[in-house]
Amino acid sequence: MLHPSYSELMQVVNSEAESPEEAIVNSRYSIVIATAKRARQIIAGEVPLTDDLNENYDVKPLSAAVEELATNKIHILPADD
């Protein structure tokens, strides 16, 4: 089981939206794409943004990306219309 859950991650990402109509993320797919992109950046050599992950080198890039999203270290930008 993924922790945090998709619904918890969606709440974190959408916490900055002023109303439900302005939600940045409306599906799990958006969460998956965002974390996959960030994981690829980490694989390419970028340093994870969470302090405890920098000390533990055994953390997988996808786990690091999920943790960054859950702690609001990275943000998903809304799509332009």
Image (cartoon, rainbow, N blue to C red):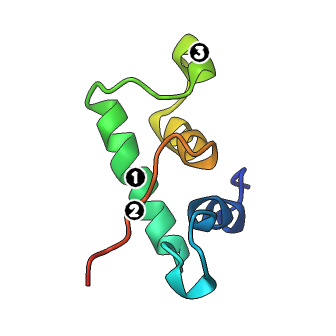
Q: Which mark is residue 33?
A: 2
Binning the other alpha carbons within 10 Å of mark 1 as few (below 14), some (14 to 19) or many (20 upward) gives: some
- Please say if 75 is above or below 55: below
Tell me residue 65's x, y (percent).
49, 42
From mark 2 to mark 1, how far is it between C-alphas? 5 Å
Indicate the secondary structure of the residue bearing disc 3: loop
Mark 2–mark 1 CB contact (< 8 Å): yes
Quarter of the image with the N terminus is bottom right
Q: Residue at x 47, y 45 (%)?
A: 74
From mark 2 to mark 3, how far is it between C-alphas? 25 Å
Indicate the secondary structure of the residue bearing disc 1: helix
- Please say if 53 is above or below 40: above
Tell me residue 63's x, y (percent).
56, 39
Q: Residue at x 59, y 68 (%)?
A: 14
Indicate the secondary structure of the residue bearing disc 2: helix
Q: Residue at x 40, y 62 (%)?
A: 33
- Say which quarter of the image contains residue 41: top left
Q: Which mark is residue 56?
A: 3
Q: Which mark is residue 69?
A: none
Q: Residue at x 47, y 62 (%)?
A: 32
Number of labels in the image equals: 3
Q: What kind of residue is marked 1?
A: Ala
From mark 1 to mark 3, how far is it between C-alphas? 20 Å
- Identify the residue position indicated by label 1 in the image: 36
Quarter of the image with the C terminus is bottom left
